[in-house]
Image (cartoon, rainbow, N blue to C red):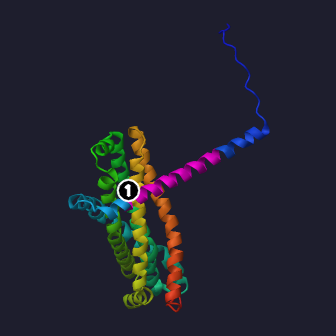
Amino acid sequence: MSTGIEYSPRPRRGVFAALKDPFVDLGGVVLRSFETLGDMTLFAWQTIRWLVARLPSRDSLYSNMYQIGVMSLPVVALTGTFIGMVLAVQSYSQFRAFGLETQLGGVINRTMFRELGPVLAATMLAGRVGSAMAAELGTMRVTEQIDALSSMGANPIQYLVVPRFLSCLLLIPSLTIMAVFMGVVGGAAYCVFLLDIDVHHYSANSKTYVETWDLIYGVIKSIFFGATIGLVSCYRGFHCKAGAEGVGQAATSAFVQSFVVIIVLDLFLSIMLDNIYSYLWPTSPMLLNG
């Protein structure tokens, strides 16, 4: 039975037209990436401008610092402890094969101070706090609370973004130091009590190969990581799409983008800080000298 609808055959596409589509899609992705980067740069500039022009109220700052710093301490301490133990487990067999198991203290501590401590604290902060900030601001965007704030003459960035950004910036060094401390304690406890490594040599090597610069190294990294988490999370919340799905996407994007930027920053900051250290102290104690 005929339905009365005539279907016209699809026009055939040439080889060049088929090859052109991926390049068009790629161009669209590149343009959108640059557009997002430009928006985030302007967002960061407005945040810093308001931070310099007027500090947030004490109540708002203390409330955010409690949520971001104090509430994050248990999870940072717990993960730091187990990361230190995992480092001991993974390194012991290799070091024992060369008779260097007493050097584990220097390796574990230096790794925690320089790399794992800052990255671990930043990852925990991005997952626990960054996603929550993006979801909270996204909900305020969807329910038009941010628009209402603007209509009353207040600047949303000053009232909503600056306290969160400043709290991340101020408290992530403390969280990093906590992660490092618990990692060092966890690694030492596992090596001494479970692997039966001599306490005297473990402690001596730990003191020899870990310097004050290693702590400064991790703290400098953490400041950049905290600023990244604050800016990316607040930006994603401010530009949330409508509906519950949009809020969920904003929270997910905040964590994923913060984590990617943290890893990229970690590489470049490591290169920069290593060059500074080599320039200032060209003869430093090296690990695995026997």
Q: Residue at x 72, y 19 (%)?
A: 8
126 above or below 140?
Answer: below
Q: Secondary structure at mark 1?
A: helix
Image coords of residue 29 (percent x, y): 59, 48
Main SS, magenta residues:
helix
Q: Residue at x 33, y 69 (%)?
A: 175
Q: Is residue 287 visible?
A: no
104 above or below 166?
Answer: below
Q: Nearer the viewer, residue 280 or 78?
A: 280
Where does label 1 land, which residue?
130
Check the image and name the residue furthest to the right. Answer: 15
Check the image and name the residue furthest to the top. Answer: 1
Image coords of residue 115 (percent x, y): 46, 73
Q: Residue at x 34, y 55 (%)?
A: 161
Q: Nearer the viewer, residue 127 or 77?
A: 127
Q: Counting other residues with Cα less than 10 Å from the Cα at mark 1, is it few (<14), some (14-19), or many (20 or more)? A: many
242 above or below 117?
Answer: above
Q: Magenta span covers which residues?
A: 25-48
Q: Amino acid at mark 1?
A: Gly
Q: Left or right of 260: which side holds 2?
A: right
